[in-house]
Amino acid sequence: MSEEIKTNEVPAAAATAAARPERPARPFAKKRFESRRKVCKVCAEKIDNVDYKNFQFVKSFTMESGKILSRRITGTCAKHQRQITKAIKRDRNLAILPYSLPKK
Ligand SMILES: [Zn+2]
């Protein structure tokens, strides 16, 4: 009986040890409370309407690959995100911005 329990216990302990490799305790714990607040870039610069002709600005809301960055990442408000997506899609159609670029 006692042997059976021992054989059951040893692999369980090994599994928990394997499941917990040494890793830094909460690497983002410090950053979490620093400057987490995101501000809409369009609101901050007091732009009423996002213009597709201002492609330098519009381009800052795209990834290097040409993808449109999400609101979660950039922190833009819903209204301006809608305008930005429209502007980016217009610029793509006019071949000002790329639809996609190959990964390096
Ligand atoms: Zn905004």
Image (spheres, rainbow, N blue to C red):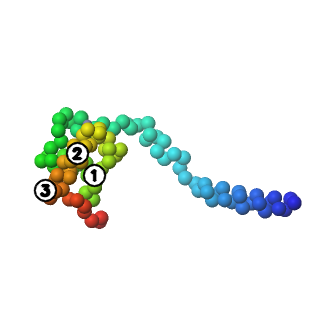
Could one spot residue 64 in this view of the protein? no
Rendered position, 101 above or below 51: below
Could one spot residue 18 in this view of the protein? yes
* Element marked by disc 2: helix
- Sooner in the amino-acid sequence: mark 1 or mark 3: 1
- Amino acid on which the number 1 mark rests in the picture: Ile
* Element marked by disc 1: loop
Question: Looking at the rendering, in which quadrant would you find the C terminus?
Answer: bottom left
- Amino acid on which the number 2 mark rests in the picture: Ile
Left or right: 22 as drawn, with respect to 103:
right
- Point out residue 9 in the picture as x, y percentages from the top left corner: 76, 58
- Residues packed near mark 3 inside 10 Å, few (<14), some (14 to 19) or many (20 plus): few
Residue at image location 29% in from the left, 38% down from the top: 77
Residue at image location 63% in from the left, 59% down from the top: 18
Residue at image location 44% in from the left, 40% down from the top: 32
- Sooner in the amino-acid sequence: mark 1 or mark 2: 1
Residue 84 is tagged as 2
Q: Are marks 1 and 2 in contact (CB under 8 Å)?
A: yes
Residue at image location 20% in from the left, 51% down from the top: 88
Nearest the viewer among 55 and 81 is: 81
Residue 68 is tagged as 1
Q: Find disc 3 in the rendering and name its residue.
A: 94
Q: CA distance from mark 1 to mark 3?
A: 16 Å
- Sooner in the amino-acid sequence: mark 2 or mark 3: 2
Left or right: 4 as drawn, with respect to 56:
right
Q: CA distance from mark 1 to mark 2?
A: 9 Å
Q: CA distance from mark 2 to mark 3?
A: 15 Å
